[in-house]
Amino acid sequence: MIFYVVKAKRVLPAVLAVVIVLAVAFIILMSNSEVLGVFGTDKDLPIYSVDYPDKVVAITFDCAWGADDIPQILSTLKNEDVKATFFVLGQWAQKNPEMIKMMAMDGHDVANHSYSHFRMGALSNAKIREEIDLCGRKINEITGNKVDLFRAPYGDYSSSVVKIARELGYYTIQWDVDSLDWRPGISQSEIMNRIVTKVKPGSILLFHNDTPHTAKMLPDIISALKNNGYGFLPVSKLIMRDNYYIDFDGTQKKNK
């Protein structure tokens, strides 16, 4: 019995010392602004969806590679009287200026997807700023319109990315419904099921051009959403411009 008492007297101070060290380390860690952003309420978040009062969603496309299916996509959108948002890479815009002009002429949002498709979260602040600015200037050069919507490639962002985008005049946009249309081997039924089961009022839907199914499926996707009572707005008309906050899950909500 004496052995266990002595052992306990030695162990308890050691355990207490470990707890104190961990507590101090946590406090120091939390004082770092990036870490505080992850655990606290000060994190700069993009908009994943909007707390919208009606059954309305936004269809978005990320355009970074080919462009052959853009005319088909635009034709479907025109036939269905739907305005969408195209997040275009600056390099893609430079290679496909006529496609950009067609999007703009049809009344769609032409939005910023960075210039080079780097993972923004791994870039320096200066490079983040350059990537966003270059793409915005390229789109403006082609369309004559100022761009104020930005989506990071791969959805890879940090507080710094969102903050820098905001300083450049951009709302950073993510999505809450991912079609996964880019995934090799995914079927049309899987894509459709993901959309109809996950969509809600104020959802932002993610698609890509230059995929095996999206352009062909788009009429059926729009029809299915219409049959479920949904209307459509481009992201520029869906989001709030002032008097809002972004909830922990990325939902944009009006301040009370």
Image (spheres, rainbow, N blue to C red):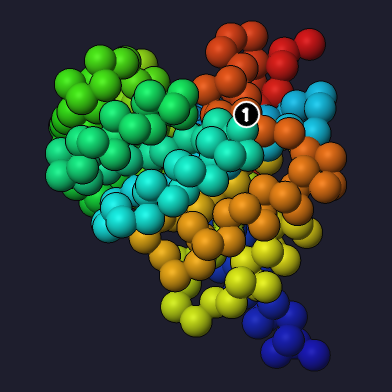
Query: Dot 1 corresponds to which residue?
Result: 233
Residue occupying the point 20% across, 25% down: 142
Q: Is residue 115 above or below residue 240?
A: below
The secondary structure type at the circle numbered 1 is: loop
- In the image, 128: left or right of 208? left
Decide: few, some or many residues near mark 1? Use Cα within 10 Å; few <14, some 14-19, many ≥20: some
Check the picture and name the quadrant holding the C terminus. Answer: top right
Residue occupying the point 23% across, 36% down: 98
Does any portion of residue 90 appear in the rendered image? no
Q: Is residue 194 above or below residue 150?
A: below
Check the picture and name the quadrant holding the N terminus. Answer: bottom right
Residue 20 location in percent, x, y? 55, 52
Residue 181 location in percent, x, y? 51, 64
Residue occupying the point 67% across, 33% down: 232
Inspect the image, locate mark 1, and give the three-letter code of the amino acid beneath it: Leu
Residue 71 location in percent, x, y? 38, 47
- In the image, 124: left or right of 165? left
State which quadrant residue 124 falls in.
Answer: top left
